[in-house]
Image (cartoon, helix red, strand yellow):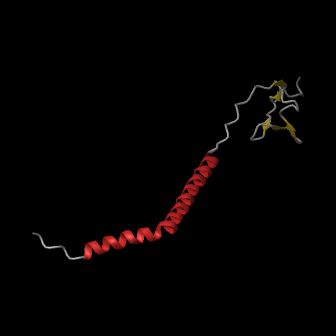
Amino acid sequence: MGDHPQSGPPLPIQTRFSADGLWWWDGAEWRPAISPDRLWRWNGQAWVPAQAGPAPAPRSNTGLAIGLTVAIFVGVLVLVMVFTIVVLLTMGNQIANVFSNVVSALTSPTPPSP
């Protein structure tokens, strides 16, 4: 007892885990902290049953919704453009007649009042 220093309880081993919690450092190399079947997890001292982690976040379909909205908007614009072109090509002369009648009516002298 005199020439041996008094030893206390062993110091706990500090287990270091990776940021994602899937690996642990054993002092020489990184080892998996999850068993291949994902049923067990290393807690730093023993393998314990793995608890179900948080449910994965639902995937956002925002990009799809925006793309679909833009596609519908562009489609409506194209349809309106085609409709306008068809109307102008088929009824252009009649529209021109209407405008010329309006112009002549506005520029003609007014008849004297009785």
Between residues 8 and 39, which one lies in front from this camera angle? Answer: 39
Name which residue lies at 53% across and 66% down.
Answer: 85
The image shows a total of numbered marks equal to 0
- Between residue 111 and residue 57, name the one nearer to us: 111
Q: At x 76% / y 25%, what residue is drawn?
A: 51
- For residue 9, above or below residue 19: above
Q: Is residue 35 above or below residue 66?
A: above
Residue 67 percent coordinates (x, y): 62, 52
103 lies left or right of 7 = left
Residue 111: give x, y in percent of width and height.
17, 73
View extreme (front): residue = 114
At a point 84% along the width and 30% down the height, the residue shown is 38
Location of residue 50 (image quadrant)? top right
In this view, which residue lies farthest toward the left? 114
Q: Quadrant of the image for the C terminus? A: bottom left
Q: Is residue 66 left or right of residue 87?
A: right
Q: Quadrant of the N terminus?
A: top right
Q: Position of residue 60 (x, y in %)?
A: 64, 42
* Residue 19 position (above or below residue 84): above
Where residue 24 appears, as percent x and y from the top left, is: 82, 37
Q: Residue at x 45, y 71 (%)?
A: 93
Q: Quadrant of residue 58?
A: top right
